[in-house]
Image (spheres, rainbow, N blue to C red):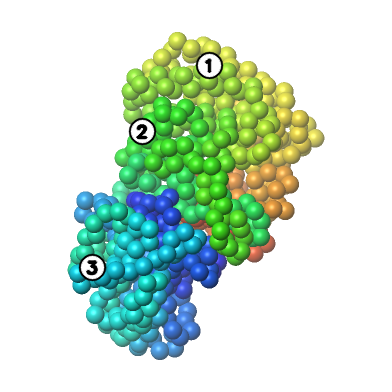
C-alpha cells in the first residue's frame, strides 16, 4: 500500500498506522520504540496485521474528525456503505496505563460484509505467538506482550495460536465494535466493550479540547492544527521525549539502502518541535520536552540523538524481513548516535531562547549547563563535523558553522537578559563574530552567487534556508542563496536536500517548507504564498500525515511517518506567513 494511504493513531505512548484498506499494518507495543505487534508494513506476506476489510470491491473516503486524531473511513460497495471509526484510546485522566486500539463499524446504507483478521507479528521469527485460555477469555502472547481481542455480539471468529479470523456484517443503523487490549508484562484491564466504545468519543473530545486551545487564528488554521496534532502523536508522554518519526526503515528511495530507524529523539528535531509547540501556545508540551532535553545533556553531554527513555541510541542492527516494497535492509538503531554535529549547539540555544522569549525562566542548573555548552561551541566550531544531514565524510559544512554562530548569538542574548552567567559573555561575542567572518570568507561562491554546502565546494545545501530564521547576517546573500537553491535543487514544488543526492532519494519536504518560511521572512510574501499553495496541492493525497520525502515525478510519499520534521517545518511556515506570536 502507498504510504500516503496510511493514517496515524496515537495515545501518547505509541502510534498505529491504519491503511485505506482497513488494515492496521504497524503498531509497536507497548511503546513507540518497542518491537512491533503488527508489522505488515515491512513484511507484507508474513507480518502481523489487524484487518477489517470489505469482502466486495470498495471505494474509500477518509478523514480525521476535525481537531482530532480519531480517524474515520467510509467504505462504499455495490451493496452498501459503512463507517469505520478508529482510535488509540485515552481516558478522562489522559493516557491509559494499557494499550487500547478501538475500531467501531457502523452501517450507513444497505449491508457491508467485512473480513476480519487479527494476526500478531512474529518479530522477524524471533517470537512464536500463542494463545491461552484465562477465565472466559482467549489471550494471545508474543514474548512478554499479551493481549485480548474484545468484540460486540455481531462478530464471531475462529481462534488459533496465530490469531483470529472471521466475518462481520453491518446493516443500516447497526453498530459493532472490535478492540485490542494489550500490555507487556503486566495485568490486563478488561472493560466491557460498551465502555471501550464510549472511550472513542471521549478520546475524540480530549483531542478537540486540546486543539481548540492552539494559538493560531490564521487562514490556514485547519492545516496548522493537523500538523500540530501529528507532532502531538510523536510526544512520548512517559518521558517527554519527541520521536523523529513513528516507524523504521521506510525507504527514502524505493530499492535504495537509505532505510533508517527514526524512533529516537534527535536534539535537532526536539528543538524545532519545542519551538513549534511554543508557537502553538502548547506550553506544557514544550516545557516537558525542554526539561527532557536538558536532563539528557546533563547525563550524556551533547549527543545527536537519544532513546525515548533517555539512554544513548543503540548501534545499528539489521532485522531479517523484506522491508517496505522489498527495500531492505530493515534497521533497528541509528548510526547518528556516534556522530558529532555542530548543529546541536544551535538547536539547543535556539530552543532555550524561544523558551525564554515566551516569558519563562531558566533555573540556575540549566543556566550553568548552557554556559558550558556555549564554551564547548566556542572551542569546537573550527572542527569538521557530520553536518545536518549526518554524512559519513566530515567537512566544514556551512550550515554547521552557521549553527555555531546561532548558538553563540543566542548565548550572548541570554546573558544580556540575565538568564545566563555573564562570565564568558564577551568571549562568546568575539567567537560569534569570528564565525561570521569565516563563513563570509570561505563559504561564499561568486560563481554560484550562493553560500555553498561546505567550504571550498560549489555544491548547494537546501538547509541553508534556515539561516534566514536564525537571523544570520547577509540579507542580500541569503536571498541569492535561496534563488540558487530553487534553480539547482528545486523539482516542481519540492526540493532535494543537497547537490547530487537526487539519484538516490526523493525530495525532502521540510526543505521546501523552510524555503517558504525564508521567503516570507525576507519580505517575499507573494512568492512564499504561491510556493505554499503549490506544495499543499502536491501533498493533498492522504489524510494529512506527512512522510519525510516525496518522489518529485510521481508525488508518492517516501521515508518514515509521521515525520516530525516535515510537520514542524509546515507549522513554522504557516506561523511566519500569518506573523502570529502567542508569546
The secondary element bearing badge 1 is classed as helix
**Residue 140 left/right relative to 253:** left
Asked if one can make out residue 214 in the rendered structure from this viewpoint, the answer is yes
| Residue 85 on image: x %, y % | 34, 69
Q: Percent x, y for residue 222?
A: 41, 56
Tell which circle, 3 or 1, labels the residue nearer the N-terminal end: 3
Mark 3 surroundings within 10 Å by alpha-carbon count, few (fewer than 14), some (14 through 19), many (20 or more): few
- 22 over 424 or under it: above or below: below
Q: Secondary structure at mark 2?
A: helix
> Callout 2 environment at 10 Å: few (<14), some (14 to 19), or many (20+)?
some
Above/below status of 581 relative to 562:
above
- x, y percentage for residue 348? 47, 30
**Residue with the mark numbered 2:** 291
Pointer 1 residue: 428
Q: CA distance from mark 2 to mark 1?
A: 24 Å
Instruction: State the CA–CA distance, disc 3 to disc 1.
Output: 65 Å
Amino acid at each position: 500500500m502507498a504510504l500516503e494511504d496510511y493514517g496515524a493513531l496515537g495515545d501518547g505512548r505509541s502510534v498505529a498506522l491504519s491503511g485505506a484498506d482497513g488494515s492496521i499494518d504497524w503498531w509497536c507495543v507497548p511503546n513507540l520504540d518497542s518491537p512491533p505487534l503488527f508489522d505488515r508494513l515491512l513484511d507484507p506476506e508474513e507480518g502481523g496485521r489487524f484487518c477489517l476489510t470489505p469482502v466486495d470491491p470498495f471505494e474509500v473516503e477518509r478523514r480525521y474528525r476535525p481537531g482530532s486524531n480519531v480517524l474515520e473511513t467510509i467504505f462504499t460497495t455495490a451493496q452498501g456503505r459503512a463507517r469505520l471509526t478508529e482510535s488509540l484510546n485515552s481516558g478522562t485522566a489522559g493516557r491509559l496505563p494499557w494499550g487500547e486500539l478501538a475500531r467501531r463499524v457502523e452501517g450507513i446504507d444497505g449491508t457491508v460484509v467485512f473480513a476480519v483478521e487479527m494476526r500478531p507479528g512474529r518479530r522477524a521469527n524471533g517470537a512464536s505467538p500463542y494463545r491461552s485460555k484465562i477465565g472466559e477469555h482467549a489471550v494471545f502472547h508474543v514474548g512478554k506482550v499479551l493481549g485480548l481481542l474484545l468484540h460486540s455480539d455481531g462478530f464471531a471468529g475462529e481462534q488459533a495460536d496465530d490469531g483470529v479470523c472471521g466475518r462481520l456484517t453491518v446493516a443500516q443503523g447497526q453498530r459493532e465494535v472490535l478492540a485490542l487490549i494489550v500490555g507487556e508484562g503486566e495485568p490486563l484491564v478488561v472493560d466491557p466493550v460498551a465502555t471501550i466504545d464510549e472511550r472513542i468519543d471521549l478520546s475524540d473530545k480530549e483531542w478537540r479540547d486540546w486543539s481548540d486551545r492552539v494559538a493560531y487564528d490564521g487562514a490556514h488554521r485547519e492545516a496548522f492544527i493537523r500538523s500540530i496534532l501529528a507532532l502531538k502523536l510523536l510526544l512520548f508522554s512517559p518521558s517527554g521525549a519527541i520521536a523523529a518519526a513513528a516507524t523504521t526503515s521506510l525507504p527514502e528511495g524505493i530499492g535504495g539502502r537509505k532505510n533508517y530507524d527514526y524512533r529516537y529523539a534527535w536534539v535537532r528535531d526536539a528543538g524545532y518541535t519545542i519551538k513549534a509547540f511554543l508557537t502553538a501556545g502548547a506550553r506544557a508540551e514544550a516545557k516537558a520536552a525542554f526539561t527532557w532535553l536538558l536532563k539528557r545533556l546533563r547525563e550524556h553531554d551533547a549527543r545527536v540523538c537519544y532513546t525515548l527513555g533517555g539512554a544513548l541510541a543503540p548501534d545499528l542492527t539489521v532485522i531479517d524481513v523484506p522491508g517496505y516494497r522489498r527495500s531492505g535492509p530493515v534497521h533497528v538503531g541509528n548510526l547518528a548516535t556516534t556522530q558529532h554535529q555542530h548543529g546541536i549547539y544551535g538547536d539547543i540555544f535556539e530552543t532555550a531562547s524561544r523558551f525564554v522569549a515566551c516569558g519563562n525562566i531558566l533555573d540556575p542548573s540549566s543556566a550553568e549547563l548552557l554556559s558550558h555548552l556555549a564554551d564547548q561551541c566556542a572551542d569546537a566550531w573550527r572542527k569538521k563535523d557530520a553536518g545536518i544531514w549526518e554524512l559519513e565524510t566530515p567537512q566544514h559544512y556551512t550550515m554547521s558553522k552557521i549553527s555555531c554562530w546561532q548558538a553563540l548569538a543566542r548565548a550572548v542574548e541570554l546573558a544580556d537578559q540575565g538568564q545566563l552567567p555573564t562570565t564568558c559573555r564577551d568571549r562568546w561575542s568575539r567567537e560569534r563574530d569570528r564565525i561570521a567572518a569565516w563563513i563570509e570568507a570561505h563559504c561564499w561562491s561568486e560563481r554560484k552567487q550562493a553560500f555553498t554546502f561546505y567550504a571550498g565546494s560549489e555544491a548547494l545545501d537546501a538547509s541553508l534556508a534556515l539561516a534566514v530564521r536564525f537571523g544570520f547576517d547577509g540579507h542580500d546573500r541569503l536571498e541569492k542563496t535561496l534563488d540558487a537553491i530553487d534553480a539547482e535543487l528545486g523539482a516542481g514544488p519540492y526540493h532535494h536536500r543537497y547537490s547530487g543526492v537526487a539519484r538516490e532519494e526523493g525530495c525532502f519536504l521540510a526543505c521546501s517548507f523552510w524555503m517558504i518560511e525564508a521567503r516570507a521572512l525576507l519580505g517575499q510574501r507573494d512568492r512564499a504564498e504561491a510556493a505554499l499553495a503549490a506544495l499543499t496541492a502536491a501533498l493533498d493525497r492522504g489524510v494529512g500525515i506527512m512522510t519525510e520525502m516525496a518522489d518529485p515525478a510521481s508525488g508518492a510519499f517516501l521515508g518514515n511517518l509521521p515525520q516530525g520534521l516535515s510537520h514542524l517545518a509546515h507549522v513554522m511556515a504557516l506561523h511566519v506567513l500569518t506573523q502570529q506570536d502567542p508569546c
